[in-house]
Image (tube, rainbow, N blue to C red):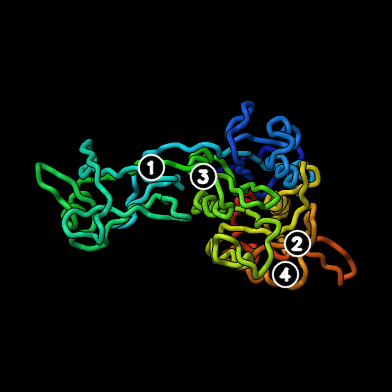
Amino acid sequence: MGYINVTWVTESPAARAMSWGNVVFLASGTKPSQCTNPQLVTPSNYTSYVNSTSYEKIAYASYVKNLGGTPTNSSYIYWMGQGSGITGIAGKVTDYQYKIELGPFSAINSVWVDPTGGSNWQEIGMAPAGWASGESGYNAGSGYASIYDGNIYFTGEALKGGPYFDSGGTTYSGATARSIMTLSGGIMRVLATQNGFGLAQTHLKDYDIQFIVPLYNTAGNGTGLMSTPAHNDIRNALAMAAGNRRMVIWALPKDATPNTEYHGTSYHYNQFRNYVGQDQNAIVIMADVLTGTTSTGLDDPAAALAGRICATHPHTSLTLDTINISLEKVEDPNAKEAWDNGKIICIFKQTDWGFDATQLNYGFTFAATTPSNRLNNVRCNYIV
């Protein structure tokens, strides 16, 4: 008969400190000389890395203020003032579609095919107008704001669809070319130029990060991280988050009002979800924050919300949670209802319950699923 040997220890068990997610703040411009990219920052050292009047400083201060106490999660700043070319082996999605990862990209440069997976690379051109018969070129995928999204498409037609290549003086295309590539382990590669978001995804892919916060000018003057318009920042950032167990927290400009068109989108501010899409990784807040000529008294709404999210246990709803933020005004009941319907987080004051507190209206994402459903799924990474 076997025995189990049990050894008793004298130490008392101690609870492990936990946070509910790590955060990266995406900032414009090139990194300061004293920093790495990304730069890990803490409440005790962040002023050594960021300028006292920068949006990074404003945002991180807003974030820490709403975390409460010393954060146990990790926070990074990534400066986006650069782009880079990249060569990627395109993964096969279907017989007629291939894709490279680590976008988004500012341009697609060329596409190459090697029919046997060896060293017989041949460049293929763009598709002729109207998908003419014969050799089958490709169409480049166009993502947000006509930015190349990493996809290349062929015709999808059995006889003509797919890449073409030369072998022994004979050109193959369509079904024959697809069969040769499948049997011989053929591969494709795409040469493209990453924009700052694509490069950020490359540099951050191995970091344990759950929340991406693109910073913006709190005055809301339309300036984005890479260029104008600012509202493309969230779409580019979502390309970094898709499928990566990450979410994007972003803020509408301070002067946004319901039933008013958000310039450049053809949608009202409260219908911004229709411009972005009902994305489970998108969290958007509207807050009319105080502004001034210096950083004193300013807040970044998205960063403040990130602080509340990371301070709140994943099993606790954000609905009616309080938030610490400098405001010009809170939303009136009619505006709150419009933001509610658009699944946009806003700030209001509940005064008819015997107390007066600045609160968040809800905790949905743009997917509009059950309250905080996807949000909790991401944060629960730290509970197990």
Tell me the crowding category of disc 3: few under 14, some 14 to 19, or many 20 or more residues within 10 angstroms, Cα based.
many
In the rendered image, which quarter contains the N terminus?
top right
Tell me the crowding category of disc 1: few under 14, some 14 to 19, or many 20 or more residues within 10 angstroms, Cα based.
many
**What's the mark number on residue 192?**
1
Q: Which residue is mark 2?
A: 347
Q: Which residue is mark 3?
A: 197
Kind of residue at badge 2: Ile
Which residue: 49% across, 53% down? Answer: 243
Distance from the alpha carbon under mark 2 to that under mark 4: 10 Å
Q: Earlier in the sequence, mark 2 or mark 3?
A: 3
Q: Earlier in the sequence, mark 2 or mark 1?
A: 1
Q: Earlier in the sequence, mark 2 or mark 4?
A: 4
Which residue: 51% across, 38% down? Answer: 203
Residue 42 location, x and y as percent? 71, 36
Which residue: 69% across, 46% down? Answer: 18
Say left or right for 152 vs 267.
left
Tell me the crowding category of disc 4: few under 14, some 14 to 19, or many 20 or more residues within 10 angstroms, Cα based.
some
Say left or right for 47 vs 35.
right
Q: Which residue is mark 4?
A: 335
